[in-house]
Image (spheres, coloured by chain):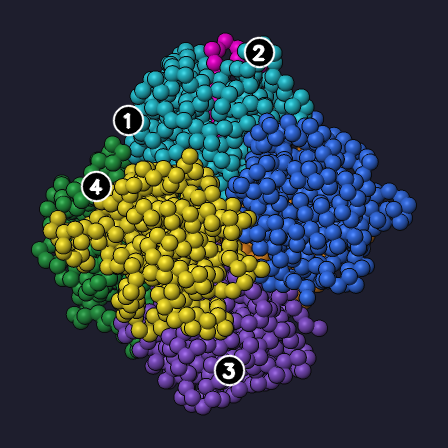
Chain colours: A cyan, B blue, C yellow, D purple, E green, F orange
């Protein structure tokens, strides 16, 4: 039986139809399957991200009617492609290994079906099973990760654990699921990790854009460079968005906020472009901790990150089908 | 008798003198008359904007002494022109038609006196009576609307009503009060309205700048284009500022926040420029919902939007009188 | 088609089954039908109660599985009787008369079916249509109202309106739906209404217990007196709980908080006793304004008020069926 | 010129008329004069009480019309006696001695006029000038202080200062303004002061009721004892209410909250009884720190403490004039 | 090396001296050792209790000087007995079994040294290792648990786990660490657990006082009964205080708040009496989740629960030493 | 004896070692000494900045281990130079002159030792003693002040006081400690000070960059100009950062927020560049008022401002030692 929501009322993302991962038929036509990962056992400081999936699914002032016509792309990311909500995976925060294993199975199953899994975290630990599951389905070592985050998440043992929200990227590289050289990190800043871990990252040939480089060279320049390089030699892109990549002023509802981040506008624009230009095969949005949010602005931002991606995916598919490129910056009312 | 404040203590905008719309003498010398529109019966989601007028009037850390010397324009928007506060219009949120009618009468009366009505909302429903009242006084179909907002507000029947905070712009166009081609919308984004309404808007020849166009072309370029086009063939400008045009990080206290908005700096600069360069004949600032605010930052921003406009209006009048243009970017201490 | 939730995700009260008032079959077996009344156009100060129904339905840390075994009564108020959720009635806050009319029709329909309507407000305006609808079904002038509130809600025209959250009790008396002498108000305090309205209330033979009388004579004494008198000469009891009857410390999330109220424990105990001892034929819980809540404690209290009533109703029905009275204060583990 | 409000808009307590202490005529007919003491330079931990006067004056959901008919006493504490608002005394928080001196002069002047000064704090430092000013007018060493507080406020030098919110009661005793034996402290609890200060207090013959004694013997018993003893050998009663006497659940908005306090109901009932039964000659309500409040519940409680006292004072005067005692627990609608 | 604080600055409880559990000498003279258990991986809904230890240690407006003279008992619970702070046990929330095992070792070690371990949670999972550790030291099956809580915490597998914050009491009984008949639960209420678990509890001969029984019979009567029965046939008392036993109005900062709880006054009085009258051999205070707190009132309450116990323990030891009973309700200034 | 923390637990900045200003040996090797100035008696509106030092020291999600390797500069600002924490200076907010005098002595002593004093405010009053103390040590009239702020802080008597948070810059100029021509103010905006004070500022040859000039000319252009001019003819730079220079969206926790400020990114980048390029001899970070903060984002920003400066200072010293300039915008993983 479909598990539904682990916490709170059983809802789907903005009212889209349900599917059940145990019933292949229920999502065989899906372009995208949304999966909740209500887990925060991997956080190294403030917890609370377990309530992220319900917040991201349910926060919106518009009717929860399974339709969202997007002004910028002119696509309905919930209607122009088939998007279903598989509910949450049961993830007991007190058992990180069991929870990650359960999630990986679901993600892999969805990815193998041909649908794009979009996972709503949960803390960043979940990118380990998420990208692993996708890599198993799409190609081991054959995906690139575009990683928006204030933190590199390439840490070593923390609090005695090899698994946690500071380590997923290391595990993906060490397992071979994703090559170090196919990691593109955008928005890093602050005081972590220390030099030895950075050296390890360099050795893996990761490419990490710290905010001072982003400011110096310009965000658009960086994004163009990332998008050009990411797609080389891979079969697909996994997009991982830690909401703390955005400045705490616009995303206070998170566990480890680091001042000096991107604007929410920059993040939305980048996500849209990636989804339009690149073959996204999986995505997660993580680290929304509603207890620290104010007036739901962080949850709403995460909701919009998902929608921006879905709209972009829909635009990309239409462009491919129509055989003409997406018209990026058309005035809103032109050709209506 | 002057109605005063509908909710809370009877205060005026930062301590300026009172006037009473029923007493023509009380504002016959006024350049600007401030009017409270404490109404939120038209909101489609979170209510609370009825407490906007008292929050906008009363939020400031400086003495409430009816004086605000502005660093950027070197004008005192409360002293260098005559600004009076007419108090609130009684607007029972449970009766939207009656409330709008009552407001329209007051706005028209003020506009006919030659003063610029500046209305403090309340939800965006009020722009229907506001701009109607001004159009009746200044010229039916002869004003342009510069509309800062995340939303187009051109909707059709919602919750069974033709009137509400999602529909004022449609009504103004349909009544003929304002021509569709004289609508300039800045800051739109997100997932509303749907295509059929956008098609209607296009047909009305509205000009709506979505955020992705603004980012692509640059905010300054857009503002120059808007300002150049708005003034053609009209007798005046109505400036309508929905506080949700600003990113929720800097304006959380509102009913329908949409991530990815303007910065507060961009809004303030734009409002100042408009007030200096164009003949503003009416203005409203709407959708401040104090219950969702934090540390009063949204109310304070709305207060500053009003002051930026008043300072600009004062600067414009001085420039006209002196016969020399406003010196825009003079260093603060130059020529003191 | 069932209307669902007017705001936010479409959920039912703690996961109970849906019904549709337009489909008589869908609730023909129901003992209780829950109805959302998401309206706050009648508030005289802070709005926000429109988001009450979704908050009351969805706030609980336990699984939303349509089951709530109650420790105090040993009944499952959601399982031992049949409880269904009819969703919200569309109630545009800007049109109070239309909204009340729509609600009254639904309530009457449910009450006529034999089910007990339990309405989740919304502001207290809704008790006018709620009790009217029930009176039409159960007996005009033949129900008593047990009214927990800080305020008498017997006001006259306010903000130009005869309808609003300060007037429902007056309207019920004036229409004859409920006799003045069958009104029992518990928890009144503070500075409203003025003497002329109190005189009118006295003339109607209402019985209103102000907090100083409650403290002097004791809450239990008062409740016994109320329960004994309420049931005389009526066919049923309508229970109306304004959450502001509780002290603002335990119920901050409301529009017109008045210090010095009941404890939440007192309210829960009273509601349980009433539901067990008296024939409740209708109920509402009103004035939960989530924007002013903290950590959801007010919404949770309102949720528990509903559950306490449902558990009591279940206990009463079992007692009647079994022919033996409810055993009130049995130790929790006795006879398990 | 009348000073008005030191912070924020210039408002009076619930809209009552202004008076100016510099103009004797402006309050010569007043029974009560309200004075703001917006000072928090004496706090030993969280500051913020300087915004107390504006919060206490302006927090109420009812119209700010200078009228408050009280259900419990059937008196209008703002209309049945003459109450005026003298505005704030300018009290720079960085200069405690100068600020206290300025306040004392105003309080003494008001008290000498025959009016009862009711001072809105500010931190508890102000009781030193408040009671000193009243003692100078009413009789040096001839008033009793009924002091509701979690803390004894009889401390010695703190942070190098002899003056502060932990020391006012010591200073009043040491100066002789109030005799130690005429201090009645209700609600003390927690972990301050230490034994040496308690010994000093004992030596002064103060009577301090700690919460464990209050719970053991009963609040009503204690209040009867206090009221009986307080009135002996004095010419009047000064009532000092530190809002932290109430449990932090109902009064979170304060600087030094101590769990386990009175209920707000107990405080309101006690204040009303004191005002009815005893000759109150001065009063203050202190330590409301709005920055720590939630949904304004603490400010509203303080507002009601003032109103409960004013209503009681009005009832006492009427009873004296009519020559018949106050009828304490009459049902609300009896004899209307 | 002493572990210190797992999260945030390294602080001790109100400034008391540190000790290190790895260095027996560092606490060989201690009467009480405070241990932080910063774990929330066992929570079934809102997380956040991991930040409880730092909040409980650091929340107080008084100087953090390792001294707290208690008004009610006239003892300094930090000075009159030797209290040391062992810092936190490293408890990764993602690994519940490992974390519990680590905590148990520390608690047992402390208890075996003769000191009373006082553990600051953390979620209620920790009572399993806490009471197990104490039972190993004091006597397996030879301690009674006085358990203040809204919930019985005797659940079965939840989210696939046998360990969690809903199950500790079951595990203690099943292991034999504590006999079912020596469990005394005070404050239960609401809708959990279901009947089968209650039946199991009854079979274990637990004694659970639901709030309706407490209200009916009186809190003091219940406490006397509990204290009399708890001490029979045991070698010591373990006191477990879940802060959610208090009404959410006074303790909002917790994960699973249940309306209708004890007052904070009742809890403090009960804890003090227990510590004075009974031989407490271990204690924990759990479920403080600072993210949901307001103005730190819940953290402060938990801090006071600890202090009330320490003061009581000191009073008990002095009474035993002096050979005369504690004088419970002496007026504060009597015999000073 | 070292004073420690005036409020709350005794902690050092992120766990760095303590020093004691009374013991010269304790900081004789220090490059930087951190000093807390917990004073808010000089604020003209909201108080609360006295809790700034503890918030700035203790807010960080990373371990408080006295180490912070900085991604942008590749330096550890706490390890690569010697940084010690002298605790707070006792500053009673009720006595501004005494408090400022006490602070000045400590700052001067530290500066004379050769260490850079970094003072954590407290309100902006403290820059008067801070810069005075540094000027006494480094050279009277021989330092420049780089002043980030929304306000010029050059006011005259306010609330009867010559000293306060609106006047420090005037006092520094009038005393001769700092020349007017060596003041560089960045980020001014809004409605204060009035023209006469601006004229005085102009006369002193201050250079004040209002936001409209910053936007017109570009932030980087302004910073280059400031840095080039500031260093002329001085022996060192004092950096004073009022957190309100940042937009209230990212820095709500302050007393006098003015909309339209810098982004947190801009501030961090500017501080880093200044610390790298110029000889900073003193610094303060002021006006963090935690009571108005949300999710600690303002405190965290202030913490990062300090760290950015310390990292830059370390980088500067290394560059000087190594004889090669700082490599500003190297990609994060290059040359690792």
Q: Is residue D275 above or below residue A61?
A: below
In front: label 2 or label 4? 2
- Asked if labels 3 and 2 touch by Cβ distance under 8 angstroms, the answer is no
Q: Chain of mark 4?
A: E
Where residue A272 sits in the image (x, y, percent)? 56, 23
**Tag on residue A322?**
2
**Furthest residue to the right?**
B323
Local packing at callout 1 (Cα closer than 10 Å; few below 14, some 14-19, many 20+) is few
- The residue lying at 68 percent from left, 35 percent from top is B185
Q: Which residue is mark 3?
A: D281
Q: Chain of mark 1?
A: A
Q: Which residue is mark 1?
A: A1
**CA–CA distance in space, label 4 to label 1:** 23 Å
**CA–CA distance in space, label 4 to label 3:** 60 Å
Q: Are marks 2 and 3 on the same chain?
A: no
Q: Is residue E221 magenta?
A: no
**CA–CA distance in space, label 2 to label 3:** 86 Å
**CA–CA distance in space, label 1 to label 2:** 39 Å
Between discs 1 and 2, the one toward the N terminus: 1
Q: Which residue is mark 4?
A: E155
Where residue F201 sits in the image (x, y, percent)? 77, 52
**Tag on residue B138?**
none
Where residue D160 sits in the image (x, y, percent)? 51, 66
Secondary structure of the residue carrying numbered label 3: strand
Q: Is residue A237 magenta?
A: yes
In front: label 2 or label 3? 2
Q: Is residue B115 left or right of residue D58?
A: right
Is residue D167 visible in the rendered image? The answer is no
Q: Quadrant of residue E306?
A: bottom left
- The residue lying at 46 percent from left, 29 percent from top is A66
């Amino acid at each position: 039986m479909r598990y539904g929501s682990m916490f709170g009322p059983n809802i789907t993302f903005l009212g889209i139809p349900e599917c059940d991962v145990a019933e292949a038929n229920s999502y065989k036509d899906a372009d995208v399957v949304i999966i909740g990962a209500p887990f925060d056992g991997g956080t190294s400081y403030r917890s609370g991200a377990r309530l992220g999936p319900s917040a991201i699914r349910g926060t919106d002032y518009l009717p929860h009617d399974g339709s969202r016509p997007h002004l910028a792309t002119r696509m309905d990311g919930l209607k122009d492609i088939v998007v279903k909500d598989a509910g949450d995976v049961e993830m007991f925060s007190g058992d990180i290994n069991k929870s990650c294993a359960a999630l990986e199975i679901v993600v892999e199953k969805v990815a193998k079906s041909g649908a794009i899994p979009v996972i709503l975290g949960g803390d960043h630990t979940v990118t380990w099973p998420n990208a692993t599951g996708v890599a198993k389905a799409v190609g081991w070592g054959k995906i690139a990760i575009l990683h928006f985050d204030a933190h590199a998440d390439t840490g070593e043992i923390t609090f005695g654990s090899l698994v946690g929200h500071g380590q997923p990227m290391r595990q993906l590289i060490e397992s071979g699921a994703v090559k170090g050289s196919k990691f593109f990190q955008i928005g890093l800043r602050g005081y972590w990790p220390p030099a030895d871990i950075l050296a390890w990252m360099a050795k893996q040939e990761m490419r990490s854009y710290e905010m001072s480089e982003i400011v110096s060279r310009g965000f658009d320049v960086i994004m163009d460079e990332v998008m050009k390089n990411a797609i080389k030699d891979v079969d697909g892109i996994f997009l991982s968005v830690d909401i703390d990549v955005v400045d705490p002023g616009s995303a206070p509802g998170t566990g480890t906020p680091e001042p000096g981040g991107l604007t929410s506008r920059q993040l939305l624009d980048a996500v849209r472009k990636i989804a339009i230009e690149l073959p996204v095969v999986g995505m997660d949005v993580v680290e929304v901790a509603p207890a620290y949010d104010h007036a739901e602005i962080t949850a709403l931002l995460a909701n919009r990150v998902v929608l921006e991606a879905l709209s972009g995916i829909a635009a990309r598919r239409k462009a491919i089908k129509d055989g003409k490129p997406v018209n990026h910056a058309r005035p809103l009312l032109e050709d209506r």
